[in-house]
Image (cartoon, rainbow, N blue to C red):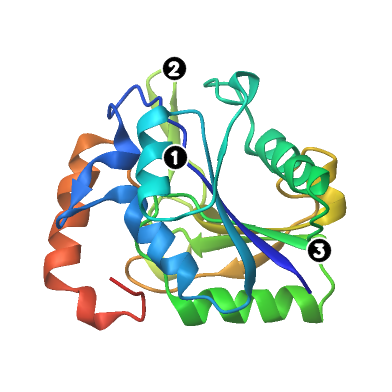
Amino acid sequence: MKILALIPARGGSKRIPQKNLREISGHPLLYYTIKFAHSIADFSEIVVSSDDAEILKYCKNLNINCIKRPSEFAEDTSSTGSVLKSTLEHFEKNDMQFDTIVTLQPTNPFRSKKNLLDAINSYQEIQAESLISVAEVSQKFGSIRNGIYLASNYSLGDRGQDMEKLYYETGQFYITSNSVARNGHVSVNPAPWICKNWFDSVDIDEPNDLKLAETLMTNFKKEADFPL
């Protein structure tokens, strides 16, 4: 199975300008996902897709294969699925075919190598169309309507262990078949891969997330099997 590792690194970010190039422990955020991708021998090819000149220059300086993303796929409303499709088309023009695409978002700098390899093996074994990383929700959630709090995944007074099991996308990785990606999707009927590591929920979205990642990178990096 030929696997393409795709790292989508858009330049625009409203909450954190130039987020993918912001430094954490002496390296740009993007660096950690690139380094992780290079630690996975199963990848046939690794590519960064970006619309940003600085990101493309950074990747070229690292001798990383990169594709300048068309502007129509670099808007706030652009889907990751459209990026997968355009990336596959780029390689097909150069007579390169891939069976599977693994999408690694730069905003998730902490990943377990074993976790991803196990997920790829599961994806192959069950012959899934796609697979996404998820984690169990541990909080009690609810909504407020007309000034009244309404519990969603539990009943008021329930213990935490009695909650309904719900899950959220961690964004750690997305595994997509060629047929799904060619139709402009990241996932269709995705199989879930449940992540259980302490760092799985780290997603750089707000400025305070950068501070959290810096702390984790400094104090806990020896506890996981991700390359730093």
The label nearer to you, 3 versus 2, is 3
Residue marked by disc 1: 142
Where residue 67 appears, x then y in whole percent? Answer: 58, 40
Closest to the observer, 157 or 152: 152
Quadrant in the rendering for residue 25: bottom left
Q: Amino acid at mark 1?
A: Gly
Q: Secondary structure at mark 2?
A: loop
Give the residue at x 36% y 75%: 226
Q: Quadrant of the N terminus?
A: bottom right
Give the residue at x 66% y 37%: 83
Classed neighbour count for the residue bearing mark 3: other residues with Cα under 10 Å, few (<14), some (14–19), many (≥20): few
Residue 79 visible at all = yes
Closest to the observer, 61 or 50: 61
The label nearer to you, 1 versus 3, is 3
Q: Amino acid at mark 2?
A: Asn
Please report whichever mark, 3 or 2, sits nearer to the chain's N-terminal start: 3
Give the Cα separation between the discs numbered 3 and 2: 50 Å
Left or right: 59 as drawn, with respect to 21: right
Q: Quadrant of the C terminus?
A: bottom left
Is there CB contact under 8 Å for labels 3 and 2?
no
In the image, is residue 61 above or below residue 122? above
Residue marked by disc 2: 146
Give the residue at x 35% y 64%: 110
The label nearer to you, 2 versus 1, is 1
Give the Cα separation between the discs numbered 1 and 3: 41 Å
Residue 99 numbered mark, or none: 3
In the image, is residue 94 above or below residue 53? below
Q: Secondary structure at mark 1?
A: strand
Give the Cα separation between the discs numbered 2 and 1: 13 Å
Closest to the observer, 71 or 169: 71
Where residue 6 appears, x then y in whole percent? Answer: 59, 52
Is there CB contact under 8 Å for labels 2 and 1?
no
